Image (cartoon, rainbow, N blue to C red):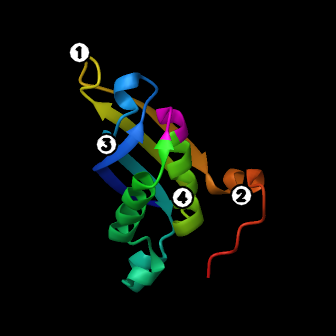
Amino acid sequence: MNQIFIDDIRADAQVGIYPHELVGSQPVSITLRLGIGSRAARSDRIEDTIDYAELVASLRGYLAERRFALLEHLADSLAGVIFDEFRPSWISLSVHKPQVLEGVGRVGVMIERKYDEYVAQAPFPLQQAA
């Protein structure tokens, strides 16, 4: 199994439950591991893989439009966006807030999801990838 990794995607997000977090956005960092097939390794065509520039732009755009109370919900929502738009076979995603607590480098969550399980739990049938 091949995978794409993207480390330390920096974006601004409206996330948090404390009063000082409710008045704007704050920086978050996202790290991804995505399971992909080996088709692109043989074809050498971007159409046969996930375009990581498009993926990063999609995540940043999504975060700019929404508010989240918890990092757990933010992470799960990002996984859904990735599955819906890019269809990896699995995702390992971590998101953290840098320097959010005094004397702590970062606070965050990590989730892992499989596409087949995501599809099975979807409230409506997902369209098949072309």
- The mark closer to the camera, 2 or 1, is 1
Question: Badge 3 local density, few (<14 within 10 Å), some, or many (20+)?
Answer: some
The one of 9 and 6 positioned closer to us in this rendering: 9
Question: Badge 1 local density, few (<14 within 10 Å), some, or many (20+)?
Answer: few
Q: Which quadrant of the figure contains the C terminus?
A: bottom right
The one of 115 and 12 positioned closer to us in this rendering: 12
What is the CA distance from the residue labelled 4 to the residue labelled 2? 12 Å
The one of 49 and 122 positioned closer to us in this rendering: 122
The mark nearer the N terminus, 1 or 4, is 4
Indicate the amino acid at tag 1: Glu
Range shown magenta: 68-73
What is the CA distance from the residue labelled 2 to the residue labelled 1? 40 Å
- Residue position marked by numbered label 1 in the rendering: 102
What is the CA distance from the residue labelled 1 to the residue labelled 4? 32 Å
The mark nearer the N terminus, 2 or 1, is 1
- The mark closer to the camera, 4 or 2, is 4
Residue 1 position, x and y percent, is 50, 60
The mark nearer the N terminus, 3 or 4, is 3
What is the CA distance from the residue labelled 3 to the residue labelled 2? 26 Å
Q: Are marks 1 and 4 in contact (CB under 8 Å)?
A: no
Residue 111 position, x and y percent, is 52, 38
Give the SS element for disc 1: loop
- Residue position marked by numbered label 2 in the rendering: 119
Residue that sits furthest to the top in the current view: 103
Give the SS element for disc 3: strand
Q: Which residue is located at x 34 percent, y 25 percent?
A: 20
Q: Is residue 129 left or right of residue 19?
A: right
Give the SS element for disc 4: helix
Query: Disc number at residue 29?
Result: 3
- Residue position marked by numbered label 4 in the rendering: 81
What is the CA distance from the residue labelled 1 to the residue labelled 3? 18 Å
